[in-house]
Image: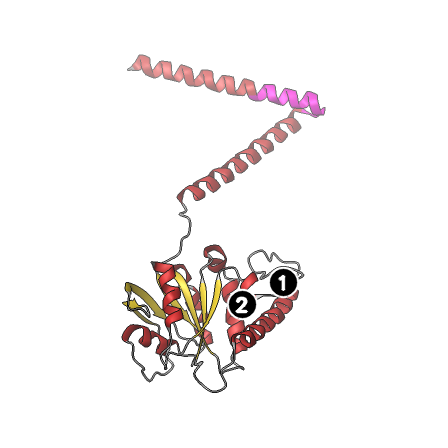
Amino acid sequence: PCTLRHGARLRGQEQGVWTMEAFNGAVLAVQQRLGVSAMAAQGFLWVSLILFAWFALQLLQGSVRRAVTKPKRLGDAVLMFGPCGAGKTSLFFRLRDDMEVQTVSSMKPLRDKFPLNTEGGEAFGPIDIIDYPGHQRLRGKAMQLLTEARCIVYVLDSTDKPRLKDVAEHFYELFTHRDMTELHIPMMIACNKTDAAGSRQDPFIIVEIEREIEQMRVSRSATLEGQDQADSFLGIEGEKFKLFEHAPCTVQMCRISAKKPAVAPVVDFIRQRFV
C-alpha cells in the first residue's frame, strides 16, 4: 500500500510539472506574439482561461436545461372564457344537463367532467370543462389555466356592443401570452344570445374586435418602443390586425343560443379536439 501511494504521489507531481511547463510555454508564446512582459502575458492567459470556462459552463447549462425540459403540449380541459353576463354558465349547464338554469355572476370557477352528446345523439367523453368567471381582476389567474387547455370556448353576448371593447382587450392579453403563443391553443368564439332582439351578426362583431385590437396594438407598440417586443407583438408589422389571419392560434366563430337551445357548433368544435 505504501508503494502504491508513493507511485500515485509521483504521478501527481509529474502531472503538476507538466501543467506548469505547458502554462509557462503558453506565457512565452504570448510574450513573443504580443511583445508584452511575462506578468502581462500571465494575466492575459488567466483572463482567457476564466472566460473560456464561463462560456463552457453556459453551454453546458443550456444543454442540460434542454435535455430535462419537456416540450409543452396541449392539456386535457376545455376552458370557457368570456365577460360577465355573456352566458358561459348557462352554456355549461346546457352542455352538462341539457337544461336552462338561472345564473348569477360568480367569483369562483365551475369545473366538472361529463360526457357530451352531438346533435345526432353520439356521446363522447367525459370532457373536463372549466367555466371561468369573467371579472377583469381574475384574468391574471385565468391565464394560469392555459397549460391545462386542449381548447378555448370564448363566449360573448352578441347583443352587447359596448362589451366588445372588453372582449378585444381580453383577446389581446390572450394572444400575446407566452403559453398561448407557444401552445397555439385553438379557440372558438361562441356568439351567444343569437335568438334575442338586437343580436349582431358575425361580420359586425369581427370588425369591432379587430378595430379595438388594432388601436391597442398601435398604443402598446409605442409604449414598448425600444424594448424587446418578441414575446408581446401581435400581428404583422405594417398590416392592420385580422382576427382569423394574425391570431397565434386557430380561431373559429359560431352563433349559439344556450337558452333556445342551439349549441351544436360548440359540441362539434370540442369533439374535433378530443375524438
| Residue 107, above or below 12 | below
In x, y percent, where is residue 148?
A: 37, 60
In x, y percent, where is residue 33?
A: 69, 22
Going by the image, does 240 lie left or right of 274? Answer: right
| Residue 126, above or below 82 | above
Q: Earlier in the sequence, mark 2 or mark 1?
A: 2
* Residue pointed to by mark 1: 224
Question: Label 2's element?
Answer: helix
Q: Residue at x 36, y 83 (%)?
A: 104
In x, y percent, where is residue 77?
A: 35, 63
Going by the image, does 138 lie left or right of 204? Answer: left
Which of the image's four quarters has the C terminus? bottom left
Q: Nearer the viewer, mark 2 or mark 1?
A: 2
In x, y percent, where is residue 198?
A: 50, 86
Magenta includes 35?
yes
| Residue 76, above or below 142 | above
Going by the image, does 206 lie left or right of 157? Answer: right
Q: Residue at x 55, y 17 (%)?
A: 21
Which of the image's four quarters has the N terminus? top left
Magenta includes 194?
no
- Is residue 113 in sight in this rendering? no
* Residue pointed to by mark 2: 172
